[in-house]
Image: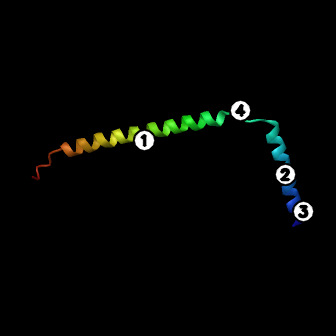
């Protein structure tokens, strides 16, 4: 069991050292903003389509009343 813990610890240390060698370039912020804007646009488009379909369905005369 101790061998597994030591191996895991050495792998984690190596990974952290590697990550420190390559500083983040800030691309994640741009990706998050673009993704959020696309999600908002999709929600707005779906809301517009639902509103138009609901209005069209409400305007259909079924001759029931």
* Horizontal relation, residue 65 to residue 41: left or right: left
Crowding at mark 4 (Cα within 10 Å: few <14, some 14-19, many 20+)? few
Observer-side mark, 4 or 2, equals 4
Provide the residue designation for mark 1: 43
Q: Residue 64 location in percent, x, y? A: 11, 53
On residue 25, which mark appears? 4
CA separation in Å, label 4 and label 2: 24 Å
46 or 19: nearer the viewer: 19
Q: Is tag 4's residue or tag 2's residue first in the polypeptide sequence?
A: 2
Marks 2,1: beta carbons within 8 A: no
CA separation in Å, label 2 and label 1: 43 Å
Observer-side mark, 4 or 3, equals 4
Residue 22 vertical position relative to residue 5 in the rendered view, above or below: above
On residue 3, which mark appears? 3
Marks 1,3: beta carbons within 8 A: no
Q: Which quadrant holds the N terminus?
A: bottom right
Q: Residue 61 location in percent, x, y? A: 14, 45
Q: Secondary structure at mark 2?
A: helix
Q: Secondary structure at mark 3?
A: helix
Provide the residue designation for mark 2: 11
Q: Is tag 4's residue or tag 1's residue first in the polypeptide sequence?
A: 4
Marks 4,3: beta carbons within 8 A: no
* Horizontal relation, residue 31 to residue 1: left or right: left
Q: How many marks?
A: 4
């Amino acid at each position: 069991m101790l061998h597994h813990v030591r191996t895991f610890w050495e792998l984690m240390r190596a990974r952290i050292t590697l990550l420190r060698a390559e500083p983040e370039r800030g691309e994640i912020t741009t990706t998050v903003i673009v993704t959020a804007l696309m999600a908002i646009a999709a929600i707005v488009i779906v809301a517009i389509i639902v509103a138009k379909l609901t209005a069209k369905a409400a305007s259909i005369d079924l001759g029931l009343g």
